[in-house]
Each structure stands twice: as C-alpha cells, then as structure tokens.
Image (cartoon, rainbow, N blue to C red):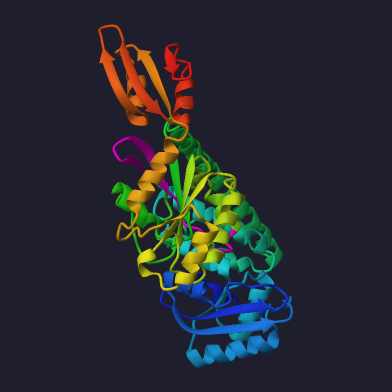
Amino acid sequence: MEKVRNKLKVEKERAILVNAIVKRYKNRNDNLAELTALAETAGAIVVNRFQQKISRINPSTYIGKGKAKMLWDRVEEHEADVVIFDNDLSPGQIRELEKIVEIKILDRSELILDIFATHAQTTQAKLQVELAQLQYTYPRLTRMWSHLDTVAGAAGGTAAGAVGGIGTRGTGEKQLEIDRRLVHKRITELKRNLAAIDKRKIREIDSRKNAFKIGIVGYTNAGKSTLMNALTDANVLVADKLFATLDTRTRKWTLSGQAEVLLSDTVGFVSQLPHQLVASFKATLEEAVNADLLMHVVDVSNPEVFEQIDSVNKVLKDIGCGQKEILILLNKADVISNVTALESLETIYPDAICISAKTGLNLDKVTQTILHKYQKGESQITITCHPGDGKTISFMQANSCIIDTQYSETEVIIKARIGKTQLNMLKRHKYTDLKTDDD
C-alpha cells in the first residue's frame, strides 16, 4: 500500500471522518465537529462520518478488523479518497488500515500538520512546520519509511527526499538507515536555522523590555485577529477557518490617550495540538511567554467552549504561562444562542468581559480595564534629567501620565503618574534624581 500514501494533502478530496471512542476513557470531543472544521480548513470534502465505541484499542488496526471492514463499506459507498481519524494512530495501524480500506489514512496530527504547512507564509513559519513534520515522521520510519516522501515540502524540496543513486541500492533495511540519516541531518539543519531566527526574535523581544506587553491567546478561530484589528488597526488577516494566521503580529495600542502598550496576536491553539508543533513554534509563542498580561479570547458561541478553555490553559501551562495574569474576554456575544453557557462562564470567571470584537461591543471596557491594570499601584513621581536625554523623556511620554513639564537650559523636570511596572523599569536605568510621593 505504499502508493496509497503518496501525499498528505487532502485538498478537494472526498473524506470520511472517523472517531473511535474508547468506552473506559472520557472523550469530550465525540461529535466530530472540530475534526470536520479541521478537514474543511484543509480543503477536504466531508462525505461521511463514522463513529464507533470500542472496548479497547486494537494494536493492529485501532478499531478492530470487523469495524475496519465496515469502514471499507463506507469508503466504497461514498467513493471516498481519504479516511481521517480523530485519533493518533501508530504507523503499523495506518499500514494495516490502508490494506483493508485501500485508500489513504491520515490521523489527527497529520491533518493539523498539513493545515499548518498550507498556511505557512513566512520563512520562519515554513521552517517551523517542516521541522514539526520531520519530527513526527522520524520515529515512524521503522514501520513506514516510504511515508518520508510526503513531508519533504513545507518549505519546498528538502534533503529528506534525496535518496537513491550509487551506493544506496540494497535491502529495505539499508534504505531505512539512509532515510534516518537524511531526516536526522535535515532536522539538525532546521534547528540550526531556527535557532538563528530565535536569537533575532529574542533580541527583538528584549528591545521591548521597557514597554508593557500584552499577548492575545485563545483557541483557533476564537476571534483573536479580529480583536487585534479592532484595537490597533493592525490589518491582520481575518478568515472564518482554523489556523488562518501562524505568524505573530505586534502593534502599538494607545489606551485612551493615556498610555501606550504593545499588543501581540499569537497562533491559535487546538485540543490535542501535536507536541512537535508546540516545540517548533517556540519562538512564535515567545510573545505570550514574555507578556506582562495575557488576554484569553473565548468563543462563547461554540458548544465546546469549556473544552476549548481547558485546551488553551493546558498549552499555556506547557509553555510556562500558567501563572501569568490573564484577562478572559468572552467573544462573539453578538451571535451567542446558549445563554446558559454564557451565564455559567460569567459565574466561573467573574472578572471576564463579554465582548464582540466584530461589532465593538464593550471594547471600551476592555481598554479601561487594561489601563487600570497598567496603572495598578500607580505612583506620582518627579524626575529631573538633561534636556538632551531623549531616552528618558521618550520613556516618560510613552509610559506615564504626565502632569507637568518644566524646561530650562540645564534640566527638564517632569511630574507624572506612573504604574508600578513602569516605575520599576525606570529605576533599572539607575537615574539619580528620581523622587516619588513616598520619599
């Protein structure tokens, strides 16, 4: 069945979706709604859904040979081109299933990787996706080495597919070792290239250390990019599909004319996000890790809203953001039909703000809440500096509410109200003439 897996892409292919629910496990995503959205985002045409409860995972075919035969009947009936599982399958299980159903089998992780590869636009995103694909493939080479050919293209042709020629002919085991060596070499090369990008990214983030940084996080398609555009006119791509944007955008956001902060949009999360993607997108997620405050955008119109919140919190914990201050924004309030779910969310998260990024509902309240958090522990200070000290003057103009400024030929005296975080930033500059109300 090697010819079955000549590609991973499912664009315009007729797909049957499968979800095998193990009875003894609690499976909250058992309605295939999310897998349907993922498949459609990848361009597949969903022609049938196949859900089965199983008492245990079959080591050979995951769902058992009897149910696999039932799946083959569905494939024949609907003339399907691909079967997509909402479960993660082993290479051996994929191989055995393909022998039975006689068409391509993809699991959940492969589908998500395909979507990321399709949506990757920048060099960094393409390298990150290719690394995740190769890391997913490497441990599977033992049982399905021909699968290697399918992952050689997130960023174009790669060394991973360059096999053959003098000295490479022989048994399958020798071919396997050649493939392993090539994949390992390419992974090393990608990590080296991404490390260089990471260093530039870290320098870029370090250059913003004097600014108050806010990261927008949330489940994919929750409305993060729409909110970013509404608050900053960032002109970020907005589309009603999963993972529409993979690259972080950072823009200045002026809070009621009183303070200026940096707002960053991040890649969307999803349940069971392949850990290879979390690892390879570390630089992209660095904006959330280094943020002073996170805004968690929640799609309250989604019936799986509670599960989505749990998935986002899990990823935040995995990347080291579990203890950060988070403001919950209950988005898409203009299209919500389940009022009970909204009331439950407002009870669980009493400080959450119900908004609509699309219509602008309560965005002024969001701005005032952020401004209050920015000015939390505010102090009134008087700072004296030289007229030529543009760095200090610019910092005060951008990060404080100036009450009065007095200029002379030798000094500038600024009286202002400044937040606790910004005051600590100012003190790190070791200015000698800085006085607060408490002095």
Front residue of 23/418: it is 418
Query: Horizontal and vertical percent for residue 202?
Result: 49, 36
Say whether residue 203 is left or right of residue 108. left
Image quadrant of residue 431? top left
Q: Residue at x 56, y 51 (%)?
A: 316
Image: 396 above or below 64: above
Image quadrant of residue 178? bottom right
Image: 188 above or below 178: above
Front residue of 311/328: it is 328
**Region in magenta:** 250-274
Q: Residue at x 42, y 12 (%)?
A: 433
Residue 24 makes an appearance in the image: yes
Q: Residue at x 60, y 60 (%)?
A: 136
Image: 230 above or below 431: below
Query: Horizontal and vertical percent for residue 300?
Result: 45, 65
Among all residues in the image, which is located at the extreme top? 410
